[in-house]
Each structure stands twice: as structure tokens, then as C-alpha cells.
Amino acid sequence: MEDPTKASFSPIEVAEGMIDNSIFGFPTNKSRELTQAFPILMFLKEKDIVEMLEKEVAFYYEERKCAFPGSINGMPMFFSVRYLNVEETRAMYKHWFGRLRELKPEEDIQSDEEIDNIINEIKEGLVKSLEEIKSERDPITNAIDELFD
């Protein structure tokens, strides 16, 4: 799933990248749109899905410079993906919303309590999201997986 030759970013680096628009990110509780931005997720093997559940993957991201030269529904498309687990996602959101509060003090930006609610929603939707990804796989992909396992 993740290219081992590419360095992953810390939660703070992801937040800063989203602020300066160099990183595109997506929480796992938006699975329909998630596979539009990261279609590679539709080709996960069952063992990869189980591994992601165990790691509590909660947020997918990639550098915008890695986007395919097209889009779906106005979103960039990536054929690579990186991720943050639940606790890393919490740290990323706290930093991201904290920076947004600094940059736009006049706007009503999420409080830490609201961030915890977002994280809880993500955790609750995690299994559902990954099961949806799994169910979107076509029979041919499933048959190929069985051949190579």
C-alpha cells in the first residue's frame, strides 16, 4: 500500500501540508469519496484490510505533487497513499485546527472537544469504511487474490 521508499510525514507535517495545500487528506469515515481520491484502496487484499483494521488507520493522505493528471468529482486522484492511525489523526487535527484558529481568529473553528467527537466518529466508522472498500472489489480481483495467496 505505502511505497517503502517514500518517507511518511508526522501528524504535524500532514497538518501543515494541508494548510499550505501541498498535501491532500481524507478521513476513513468518508469511504465512497475515499476510493475516488485513492482508487488503489479498491485493490487491497483481505489481509491488507485486516492489517489496516488492526492499525486503526483513520486518515489517508498523499502529497498533491503525486496526483494523477485528472480528477473525479473535483478531487485529485492518487495511485499511492499514506496513512495516519487514530492517535496520529487526533494529533494532526488538533494541530490543524489550532493553526486555523491562529490564521482565522474571527471564524468559529472546532474546539478540542469537537475534534474528539470527530475522532470518535472516525473510530466508529472505521470498520464500516473498510468493509465497504472490500465489498466494492470485483470478482476478478478476488479470484486473482486467491490464486496468489
Image (cartoon, rainbow, N blue to C red):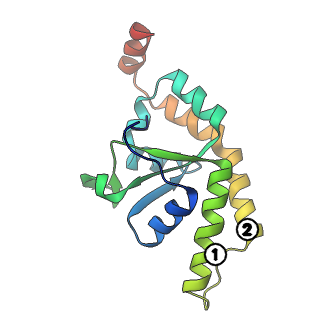
Q: Secondary structure at mark 2?
A: helix
Q: Tell me which residue sits at (38%, 37%) in the image.
A: 40
Label 2: how many Cα within 10 Å (few below 14, some 14–19, many 20+)? few
In the rendered view, does 90 fall on the left or right side of 138? right
Which residue occupies the foreground of this view, 36 or 15?
A: 15
Q: Earlier in the sequence, mark 2 or mark 1?
A: 1
Which residue occupies the foreground of this view, 53 or 138?
A: 53
Residue 54: horizontal and vertical position, in percent?
66, 32
Amino acid marked by disc 2:
Glu
Q: How many numbered badges does the structure rendering display?
A: 2
Q: Which mark is residue 113?
A: none
Residue 13 shows in this picture: yes
Residue 90 found in image quarter: bottom right
Amino acid marked by disc 1:
Gly
- In what quadrant of the picture does the C terminus appear? top left
Q: Which mark is residue 114?
A: 2
- In what quadrant of the picture does the N terminus appear? top left
Q: Tell me which residue sits at (40%, 12%) in the image.
A: 143
Residue 3: horizontal and vertical position, in percent?
38, 37
Q: Is residue 74 above or below residue 34?
A: below
Furthest residue to the bottom?
Answer: 106
Residue 127: horizontal and vertical position, in percent?
65, 37
Separation of marks 2 and 1 at Cα, in angstroms: 12 Å
Q: Secondary structure at mark 1?
A: helix
Which residue occupies the foreground of this view, 149 or 35?
A: 149
Q: Which mark is residue 98?
A: 1
Residue 53 found in image quarter: top right
Label 1: how many Cα within 10 Å (few below 14, some 14–19, many 20+)? some
Q: Is residue 114 above or below residue 104?
A: above
Residue 55 found in image quarter: top right
Residue 73 shows in this picture: no
Residue 120: horizontal and vertical position, in percent?
73, 53
